[in-house]
Amino acid sequence: MNSHNLNFCLFIFFLIIGPSLQGQEFVELNEVDVSNKKDPFALKKLKDIEGTSIYAGKKTEVVVVENTNASLALNNARQLYKRVSGLNIYQNDDAGLQLNIGGRGLDPNRTSNFSTRQNGYDISADVLGYPESYYTPPAESLEKIEIIRGAASLQYGSQFGGLINFITKKPSKKKGIRIKQRSTFGSNAMLSSFTSIDSKKNKFSFYTFFNFKRGKGFRSNTKFESRNIFFNGIYDFNENFDCSFEFTGLNYVAQQPGGLNDRMFSENPLQSNRSRNWFSVNWLLYNLKLNHRINNYNTQTLNLFALDADRSALGYRSNRVDQLDPMIERDLIQGYFNNWGAEYRFLNKQDILGIKTGNLIGIKLYQSNNVNIQGPGSDGTDANFDFYYDDFPAYQNQSQYIYPNLNLAFFGENILYINEKTSITPGFRFEFIDTKSNGSFSKMLFDGANNLISDTTIISQDTNTRNFILLGVGVSHRKTNEIEFYANFSQNYRSVTFADISIVNPAFSINPDITDEKGFTGNLGIKGILSGKLSYDINYFYLSYQDRIGFIQKIQQDGNVKSERGNVGNARIFGFESLLEYILLKKSERGTKITTFLNSAFLNSEYISAEQNGIIGNEVEFIPKANVKSGITYSYKDFSGSFQYTFLSQQYSDATNSLESNLSGVIGVIPNYQILDFSLSYKKEKYSLESGINNILDASYFTRRATGYPGPGIIPSPRRNFYVTFEFNF
């Protein structure tokens, strides 16, 4: 019997015999927390047990939003996640409408390689079929952001990246009504208004906000307008039982300037030759949560959630991005996402034969019925998201698919405290996945004069049913209360998305034999606090990625070379990640305080097997070998100021490690870049003033080569910009 099966059997054994051996009240051991009451550091760690979740032996990071000194109204991810090691961030808008982060070689596009949640429930389009996040909570509404790396796959889904959980602010425990108003003005006609209200009366309390944003963007042919509303109501039946209801609504429309090729970017990175490209999102989220603390030993939660959403992408998308828009019909892609789910968790704390344990079991049911339609849009210039089949019957990129998905997961983890210093956390996750694809697409042939020769509608019906078990284990050893060694291993899995198989894109083709990805993640690290001044978390990770999906350059039947998306091969990614945060000076609680941090990741990667020649030995895409963020913060009483430096080395965008761009700008090198940011704040109880300059040195750079919208092609990043925020509390 191998070690993974042994861990699984141990868990089941303790789960079965546990209730009969329940003894004295469970006492949690002291945790390693990179904060304390007098000298809080900006980044914290999760406790071994929080609510009905187990985090022992995992690499966890908690971003305390109010301690980041970030430009919150802009949702500036580079600043919000500056202390989270190794993250690769797409930076292509100056309003933070979408979050695009990855790490360890994972594609940052819409954070699709993480399980993305808000207050513990899923918020992405479709957890299995299309795990992209079009909705990102405004940073001004957040209390903290919890991040768990690959080992989170056992409790929160099988993704390689792990978990990102946005925790919104909660209602104040004080009776009465409190109102907060934040108004932000910035470069490029940026305007943001954030209004929040929290109140408590008797057993009922609520927190709600409304966020409005608009701006022109930093490139021509760019503008956006966004509205976001949120409500969280909590009713406390008693001190051990409460019920909460959440509603989230988002609507935004953005004009997109399109992508560039390398020559265009070199000539003028702010140029645009696309004036008719638009993007729209409507997002409605619902959540009902029951929390029940049965007694000192047992706690249970039930999460019911649903999504009703759609997104539309409209524009002219030529494979040759420097081609001027001929003002013909535009390509329109519409997606409708309707899903619901239920997740039940039960946590038991007890002594078993003198060994303290924490036992978690859970079950999740998830069902979705999504629709994706592609066809001809209007030949106008406005944000008209209607199809025009009758006006353009010979339009080539026509398809319509329905994707019914069903997922049933059963998971469990168990903490065994061997002694006062050491714990072992084995776990498992069983997944049943049933994905279907029912639809059709048009296959049209044209002669040299662009006359239609034939038009064939091809019907496609596919079913893919699979089930599997993911295993993992974590180990934690606390040498002292301020030093912890940790190690973990977890298997991962990522299913093929419907965007991988059904959307027609002129910039690339899709391999019809594309299949799911699988692999595992391992971490080995040390974290703690030294002399009350130095907080550190240093770890080595290894990620095995099998059947990795990516892009290669492939010769087509007509002799042309075109990017193809498919299973490139097996890859390994490994490296060191570290965060060091040091208090240089602290005279008193409200006196002068100077802190500095260094966040660095040094990675290596290679493809170790591939079917196509020229891939083995290549570096894996989306991996800068050096990823460094550093900064210094000065504070005195109510005033604080910060500098932040960011450096990422060169990275590739396709598995063939292409150095030069193609006509569409989709493949090629993403050059190294370095950015310097500055922020100031002055905060009182009733009001505050925040300001800053992002990209002080006005660097011209890009972080993304988009394969579809908002491209295709190079998507430039924001140049120097500023903001100022006024906050009033009533």
Image (tube, helix red, strand yellow):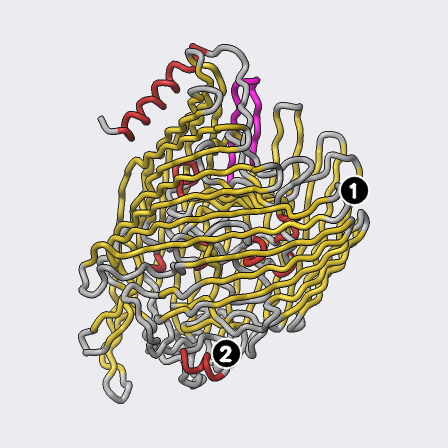
Majority secondary structure in the magenta region: strand
Task: Bin the neighbour count of mark 2 within 10 Å (Cα to Cα): few under 14, some 14-19, many 20 and up.
Answer: many
Where residue 413 sits in the image (x, y, percent)?
41, 29
SS label for mark 1 = strand
Left or right of 229, for residue 537: left
Tell me the residue at 30%/60% (across/down): 619
| Percent position of residue 582, x then y | 60, 46
Residue 177: mark in rendering = 1
Residue type indicated by callout 2: Pro
Q: Position of residue 121 (x, y in %)?
A: 51, 42
656 lies above or below 43:
below
647 vs 317, left or right, is right
> Sequence order check: which comes first, mark 1 or mark 2?
1
Residue in the foreground of this view, choosing between 173 and 506? 173
Which disc is residue 72 wearing?
none
Residue at image point 29% right, 70% down: 563
